[in-house]
Image (cartoon, rainbow, N blue to C red):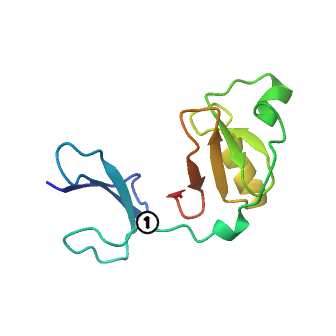
Amino acid sequence: PRWTLRQRTPGSKMLFFLLRSSPNRPLRIAAFHRSEKVKGECDKMAECQHLDQIRDVKPSAEGCEECLKTGGRWVSLRLCLTCGHVGCCDSSPGRHARQHFHETDHPIVQEIGGWGNNRWCYLDNVQVP
């Protein structure tokens, strides 16, 4: 099939589809709000509504701020694109980037020091261009 439904978490308001345009092409992920009607081809992807909160920031530390203070360890790092806070990812024990989001409502983070510069919006639960 051209697309396969994958719901991320039980009770989630978002539906995630894995899209493949041909067998030799890489997978793409499309996210839809559960209330949207999905017809045949998936044509309306969820978009981040918080791009206006992205600022030109400098990292506040060379590692996760909280882990550096407590001697914790991290898997990878996330940079808050609103204030520059550096926190550890959700795969890390402390999940300090997400904790920072809950404390400040700064929604968009960017991966740093990893395989790419992926951006994520915690509020819209989507990847940000």
In the rendered image, which quarter is residue 44 located in?
bottom left
Q: How many marks?
A: 1
x then y, percent, for residue 3: 22, 56
Figure check: 47 above or below 85: below
Q: Is residue 28 above or below residue 49?
A: above
Quadrant in the picture for residue 10: bottom left
Q: Amino acid at mark 1?
A: Lys
Name the residue rendered at 69%, 70% in the picture.
52
Name the secondary structure under disc 1.
loop
Q: At x 84% / y 41%, what residue is drawn?
A: 60
- Towards the viewer: 9 or 47: 47
Using residue 52 as the reference point, say whether residue 31 is left or right of it: left
- The residue sitting at the left extreme is 1
The N terminus sits in image quarter: bottom left
User: Residue 40, how many percent across, how many down?
Assistant: 19, 71
Disc 1 crowd, CA 10 A, few/some/many (<14, 14-19, 20+): few
Identify the image quadrant of residue 67: top right
Point out residue 104 in the picture as x, y percentages from the top left corner. Answer: 78, 58
Task: Name which residue lies at 72% across and 66% down.
Answer: 53
Closer-to-camera residue (13/97): 97
Residue marked by disc 1: 13
**Residue at 55 percent of width and 67 percent of height:** 48
Location of residue 99 in the rendering, given as x and y in whole percent from the top left corner: 71, 47
Horizontally, residue 57 falls left or right of residue 111, namely right
Q: In the picture provided, is 95 more to the left or to the right than 82? A: left
